[in-house]
């Protein structure tokens, strides 16, 4: 298979997004209690729900940004790891200490017992 035919077949692939909506729903105390316990609840029919955000469940990108393009997560997950690893800039290493630098020993401290933590309200 030639490079030209490979690129043509990739461009014709269809990778649809799975759209989800982050929503704010006003509920009463009993529904809130059930939702907190069961992590789900039922709404009334024809209840109006305010949509806070619309995004793709797979690639986590907003609807307005990627509505007319294929889903990046269906192709590969490079967008989640900061791009292509082979061309991404390497992490910076910290600079070594200056030539005459010395470590200065600190004082001793107690991590356990009453000397470690003294509460102002508790001590009398």
Image (cartoon, grey):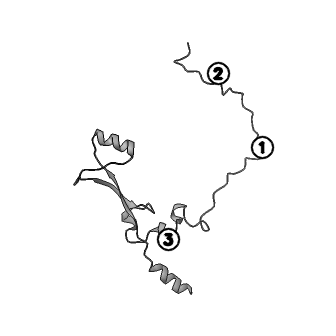
Q: Secondary structure at mark 1?
A: loop
* x, y percent for residue 106: 72, 31
Residue 79 - label:
none
Relative placement, left or right, of 115 versus 76 is: right
Q: Quadrant of residue 58?
A: bottom left
Up/down of 3 relative to 36, above or below = below
| Label 2 neighbour load within 10 Å: few <14, some 14-19, many 20+ | few
Q: Residue beneath label 1, please?
A: 100
Q: Residue beneath label 3, please?
A: 75
- Compare marks 3 and 2 and give the one earlier in the sequence: 3
Quadrant, the C terminus: top right
* x, y percent for residue 15: 43, 72
Circles 3, 2 touching at the beta carbon (< 8 Å) = no
* x, y percent for residue 37: 39, 42
Relative placement, left or right, of 30 versus 1 is: left
Give whichever of 76, 83 is nearer the camera.
76
The nearer-to-camera label among 1 and 3 is 3
């Amino acid at each position: 298979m030639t490079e030209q035919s490979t690129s043509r077949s990739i461009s014709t692939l269809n990778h649809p997004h799975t759209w989800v909506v982050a929503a704010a729903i006003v509920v009463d105390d009993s529904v809130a209690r059930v939702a907190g316990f069961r992590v789900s609840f039922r709404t009334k029919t024809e209840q109006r729900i305010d949509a806070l955000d619309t995004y793709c469940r797979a690639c986590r990108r907003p609807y307005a940004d990627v509505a007319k393009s294929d889903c990046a997560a269906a192709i590969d997950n490079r967008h989640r790891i900061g791009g292509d690893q082979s061309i991404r800039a390497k992490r910076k290493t910290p600079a070594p200490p200056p030539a005459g630098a010395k470590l200065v020993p600190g004082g001793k401290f107690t991590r356990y017992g009453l000397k470690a933590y003294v509460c102002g309200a508790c001590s009398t």
